[in-house]
Every structure is written in C-alpha cells, then in structure tokens.
Image (cartoon, helix red, strand yellow):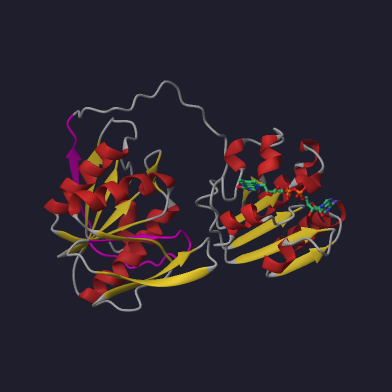
Amino acid sequence: MAIIVYLETENGSFKKSALEVSSYGRKLADEKKTNLCGITFNSSDPFKIEKYGVEKLINIKTDHVFDAKIYADLLCKNFRDLGGTIFITGSSADSRFIFPIISILLDASYATNVVEFPSSISPLVLKRSVFTNKAFVFTELKNKHKIIGILNNSFGIFESERKLEVKDYISESLDSNVQVESIKEDGEKISIADAEIVVSGGRGLKGPENWNLVEDLAKTLGAATACSKPVSDMGWRPHSEHVGQTGKPVASNLYIAIGVSGAIQHLAGINASKCKVVINNDPEAPFFKAADYGVVGDAFDVVPKLIEGLKKFKSR
Ligand SMILES: Cc1cc2nc3c(=O)[nH]c(=O)nc-3n(C[C@H](O)[C@H](O)[C@H](O)COP(=O)(O)OP(=O)(O)OC[C@H]3O[C@@H](n4cnc5c(N)ncnc54)[C@H](O)[C@@H]3O)c2cc1C
C-alpha cells in the first residue's frame, strides 16, 4: 500500500525536481497514513533525500545508458517489490518516456502535468494543466495502480525528516536497443528544467555579441539562460537553450523575456512559469498580454540598469 516516488539524479546527485516529488509524496503518504518509499538510479549521496520524508530508498545500480524500456522494467519490478499503489514522478523528458511504458506494464491510470496537491484523496482527483497552461482539468484516477506526474515548481520543496533505510539493487545486464555513439555536453550552467529563474533573450537583442546582457542578468539572479527559436536557429545560442512549443518547456518561478515578441509558439512552452516579466521596446508586442510585469523600453538601456539595481540591492 506504499506510495513510491521516482527520484531522478544527474551525475549521481538528486535533481531539484526529486526533492519536490518527495515533498509531494510525503504529504500524500501522511494524508493516506502510509509509507513513502523512493526508487532512484545510481545515487552517490542517497541519504540526502532523508530530509524530504522518504523512509526507504532503493538505489538501482546500473551501468546501462538511458533506455526507457529498461528503466521502466527496473522501476516496475521495484515498485511491485515495495508494494506500491501510487507512483509519483516529475515531468522531465526522461520520465515522460518512461512512465507511459510503466502505466501499460502496471495497468495504471496516469495523470501528467499535475499542478497541485490532490483536491480529493479518495477518490483521487488531480488538477492538471492542459492546452499549454491555458486551462485546467480535474482528472480522477480510477485504476488500482495510479501514476501522478507533477509539473516542476508546482508544489514546492518542504523538509520533513524521517529515518531512511537505503538498499542497493544491482541490476543485471539487460538487452538494450540503445547504443550511445558519443556524448556532447550542452554546456548549460543551470539546467532550464531545474531553474527557479530563467532569463531569456530574443531577436530584439540584435546579435550574439550582445548576449552578455542576458548572461550578466542571469548570473546576478542565479538564473538559467534561454532563448527564442530564431535565436538558436541563427546559431546565436546553442539549441539546448531554445524554449517554446518546439523547444524545452519552462516552469520556473520567474521568467524574464528580453526582446522576445511573445509569439504563440514561444508562449506555449513558457506559460507554466509563475511570474513572467517582459522587456520590449514595442508596447504592442503580444508578450505584454501574457506578462505579469512589463517594461516598455530599449533592452540596451533597461537591462544594465536592472543589473545595477539588483547588485546594489544584493549588497545591502
Ligand atoms: C511550427 C513552429 C514552431 C515554433 N516553435 C517555436 C518555439 O518553440 N519557440 C520560439 O521561441 N519560437 C517558435 N517559433 C517561432 C515563433 O513563431 C516566432 O517567430 C519567434 O518566437 C520569434 O522570436 P523572437 O521573439 O525572438 O523574434 P521577433 O519576433 O523578431 O521579436 C523580437 C522582439 O524584440 C523586440 N525588440 C527589438 N529591439 C528591441 C530592443 N532594443 N529592446 C527591447 N525589445 C526589442 C521587438 O519589439 C520584438 O517584439 C515557431 C514557429 C513555428 C511556425
């Protein structure tokens, strides 16, 4: 009857989203008066999750490269061994590959893009974002096994320490259809998926030589950097920074767009951000309609002043 959380790692460390998934699972386990167990791959510091309410953690040791089918099989086996009923995951690209497979293997109902703690526990009803955050639906999960996929930054991270037991599960070598030829690091300093704050630049910045504005503001705020599609298409910035409908989704707490017009395809990917700030010299730019705060002005005047003001504020 346990609740199981899938805790994603990157280079052996738990991702920020794993802490959020644990916090969500802890609260649900408390409401349902049951245990919270976690499953992770290759964690090098498993006891870090103790603070976030997990009582038992299976640390799967595998040298397989990411293969959704193999990861799904390993997660399913351990989910069953732990006596899981509800599986909670984040919304990374990898988990969006893995969990549809798990939902078939477990015959589980699966709700993606969950943005809040359940409005009802029994029956289990979840609020979900749909149509790129333009509307919400309430979905009831009816099957015996249930999967909740929560959207990053939608619940928050809360500490609630429990005594943690960690068990290693050594995965045997399994047949994989995936073979990695080479790995190219994308050089992201703070990953867009995990970032609390994202600073994004568009074609209004005129050229790659002006990206110091975006980078300086991001550095001052401890933010990740992003860009619109044409900016990465023109090679001003790496493709890993392209956000929007055809790029990476952003669900940060703060999204600052500089010289980005706010085309529907751009907004589609960033709408889940909680607070959107736009700096644009055209008062008619469509982004202003979607923004929480807008500055009508030339980015080359506004951004240096903003950086200066923030630095002064931080040094107080
Ligand atoms: C199928 C499809 C998928 C797409 N997917 C995506 C996607 O995933 N992501 C995405 O971003 N786009 C996507 N696009 C492209 C999208 O339609 C827009 O063309 C694109 O978002 C525009 O990029 P931009 O805002 O940087 O440039 P522009 O549209 O050229 O806007 C530049 C903005 O900068 C402002 N500006 C100019 N100078 C200054 C200044 N000095 N100071 C301040 N502001 C200034 C202008 O007023 C303008 O609003 C897609 C298009 C299609 C057809």
Q: Is 273 above or below relative to 195?
A: below
The residue at 33%/68% (across/down) is 160
Please name whichever residue, 313 or 266, is drawn nearer the observer in this view of the structure. 266
Q: Which residues are magenta?
A: 146-172
The residue at 69%/53% (across/down) is 220
Q: Quadrant of residue 267?
A: bottom right
Q: Quadrant of residue 69?
A: top left
Residue 154 can be seen in this image: no
Q: Does the magenta segment cover residue 162?
A: yes
Q: Does the magenta segment cover residue 13?
A: no
Q: Is 219 above or below relative to 162?
A: above
Residue 261 can be seen in this image: yes
Q: Quadrant of residue 125?
A: bottom left
Please name whichever residue, 16 or 246, is drawn nearer the observer in this view of the structure. 246
- Residue 168 x, y percent position in the rendering: 19, 42
- Residue 40 x, y percent position in the rendering: 28, 47
Quadrant (top left, top right, bottom left, bottom right) of the N terminus: bottom left
Q: Is 122 above or below relative to 16?
A: below
